[in-house]
Image: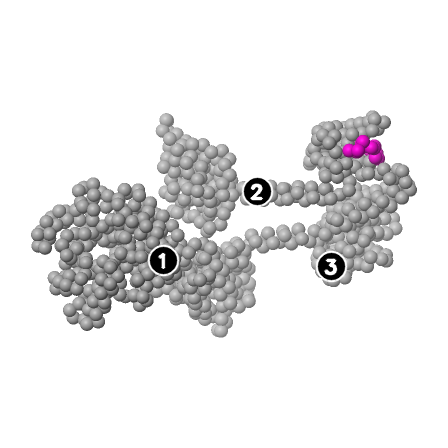
Amino acid sequence: MPQPIDTYRAIAENAVDPIIVSDPGGRVVYANPAAERVFGYSPEELTGKPLHEVIRPRTADCPFRRAATGGGTLLGHVETFVRKDGSCIAMAGTLTPFHEGDRFSGSVLFLRDMTEHLRARQALEESEQRFRLITDSMPQLVWSMSPKGTITYVNERFRQYVGPQLRLGSEYVAPIHPDDVVATQRALEHALRTGEDYRIEHRGRGADGSYRWFLSHGVPLKDGDGKILAWYGSSTDIDDIRRAGDALRRSQETVRLATELTNLGLWEFYTETGELVWDETNRRNYGVPLEGPVDYDAFIARIHPDDRERVDRVARKLTVPGSTGRFFTEYRIIRANDGAERWLKVNGESLADNEGRTRFVGTTLDITESKLAEQRVRHASQRDALTGLPNRALLFEYCDHLLAIAQRTRSSGALLFIDLDRFKPINDTYGHGIGDQVLKQVAKRLNACTRQEDIVGRIGGDEFVVALPHPDDVHGPATVARNIVERISEPYHIADLQLHLSPSIGISLYPRHGTDLDTLIKCADAAMYEAKKAGRKRYRFYSPALDQGTDPHIQLELRLRDAIERSEFRLLYQPVMDLGSGATTGAEALLRLPMPDGGMLVPSQFLPAAEAAGLINRIGEWVAQEACRQHQEWREAGLPPISIAINVAPQQFRQRSFIRYLANSVERSGMDPSCLQIELKESSVLEDVHETISALEEIRAIGIRVALDDFGVGYSSVRLLSSLPIDALKIDQSFVSGIGHDAKSQVIADTVLALGRTLNLQVVGEGIESEDIVDYLRGHGCNQAQGYYFSGPLSADEFVSWFHAAEPERRAMH
């Protein structure tokens, strides 16, 4: 016998809907395959993540997050979530807590895709709206009844005619003339009892108190078991028909106008003679002349060749003696007058005259637009909504077809896996709107680099695939890859921005590297990572040797993600000295990444990987929070209010949320904002100077100081210094180290020092390693200095010990 837990797991593993189990802290401990498929995450990406990061709601205040961590219950809550690839899905969720004894042990979340339900509801609402628009435009009194005979709906014409005396829920479609009440009641009761059509002529009182004759006709709507769900009908004013001889012509005109408004064609078919009668609307639908006879041959000739045999079978069944009943069919026609292809929906019903002769009457409705809308929906489901390229599903469908042909013809092929370098920083810095514009341009450039028979698809995010069937010498995979590298690497001009990115391309060959698409993509993906390792903006062919080891690029990215999730980064602190007093005036926070082997990586070794993976902003937020927290801890331990400096990457600085989280870090820690200094590279302030100045002014308004780091390396920043709201310049250490033996470095250092004095800015010398350089900088007006001459980077505790041990001695020396 299987254990209950095995049974439950088997049920969850095979469920079509997502099931996610979280621990008391709201972190995912289990997600079934349906959850992985729906949200696009691998098991490793799901497990251990907070529930609200896995099922990311579009709304900021998600009740699932509160309920998952608070042990609450949610029943059938509908939320829109963002998948891993950025697409959205509407789902209904039920979140239930479970307990071990009295202890809250976690929650189980059951989700159901509501996309089709919402789409169906929208379609129903649109259908009801169309129904009301059509009926309100009709001259008849249109109504509906419940199965028990109470009025549930009337159109505008009905309301206008009856006036204030109208009451929904009344037994009759209008106030009835006293002489007609009994007959009307009997007809209604008979229809309700038998389910047959309701048809009666009666007089109804209008708003002005007068009576007119109406023909009321209703038909039942039944379910599959024959149970009546509702009645639908209309009351046609036949007062003139009964009172005057021309009423018939007026009735025909009413019908004609109604059919023209709805583009509804009318037809009759006499089974004994084969005579076919079309009204003008039907003739226009088929594109035939408005005058002259129409026979069966003329009709069948207009049917699309692919539908002609099927329609002919339906039509010939009508000529079989004794044929009765209703029928329905849809087919395409080739219109006679212009050759246009149109879709028609045809309904028919048999009628018999007093002599038993049968004819069929019916309607023809042009449904081309609705059919085209269906095709557009189907097309949209197979295309990437942003770029219009085939999505993953359609790409696999196309490529499976190409692989089948290649197998039959024993031909070759190639697959290019393309990943965009530096796209994530663009997305993070300028927002998804700019990122989407870049992706659209990339798609156009990829199409321009390929042949008509090649397939270009987007499989998610910034990853694209190009399939090359039977590549020739001119359009070989290497040639195509070189063209793609060249075209994709050209600048992107969007709004006032000039953006740069490049592709890394991996290439796999059919049948050498695989005979199915999954294998070819896997091989091309591995080759793409080799291209990235080689310096990006390159392409590489797959080699089986790539499978022999683990890609260090991937391992580094995984280590970075682990360090973020577990807060395993470390900050070291290098003292900054005042050259006038010799006192310790501050510290620069230096980021380090501990590695499993016990070593630590410096930023230059891991920030490029963090930048490529889109992790720069999360790392920067951690640095700001940790530095502010540590500063406040030092103050509580008795250290004076020295300043603490953090380095800010260009991508962080251009992020719209940067100033907000910087201010939040200061506020949460309780530190004095004037003790925090951010250090920016010159490159951070060179793009969009107007926005840069605005951001710097906002930062300084909080009380935070701003310094330009590694100053002197850039070429255009000198002329901007006078307009930039900054507090300090840090001379690049390459110039500081050259003082005394390199004339060029000494001139640049002297120039920076002079600029600092002129603009009343503090100047800090970096990389000080000798007393001679200290004396030179002090003698030329440098305010502060840091470097191994004073101290290397220290842990937080080491910094406190160093400060208490060395500070009195330094002050005494000065």
Q: Name the N-terminal-most of marks 3 and 1.
A: 3
Query: Residue 118: which disc?
Result: 2
Residue at left 44%, top 62%?
496
Camera-side residue of 410 and 471: 471
Q: Main secondary structure of the magenta part?
A: strand
Where residue 537 sits: x, y (%)?
A: 39, 65
Of the two numbered discs 3 and 2 on the same chain, state the one appearing first in sequence: 2
The residue drawn where x is 44% and y is 42% is 60
From the viewer's perspective, is the residue at label 1 or at label 2 nearer? 1
Q: Which residues are magenta?
A: 200-213
Residue shown at the point (26%, 63%) measured from the top left: 711
Q: Is residue 135 above or below residue 812?
A: above
Q: Quadrant of the N terminus?
A: top left
Mark number displayed over residue 334: 3
Q: Amino acid at mark 1?
A: Thr
Q: Is residue 772 visible?
A: yes
Foreground residue, 153 or 479? 153
Q: Is residue 531 above or below residue 706?
A: below
From mark 1 to mark 2, how far is it between C-alphas? 45 Å
Residues at discs 3 and 1 in contact (Cβ within 8 Å): no
Identify the residue position indicated by label 1 in the image: 692
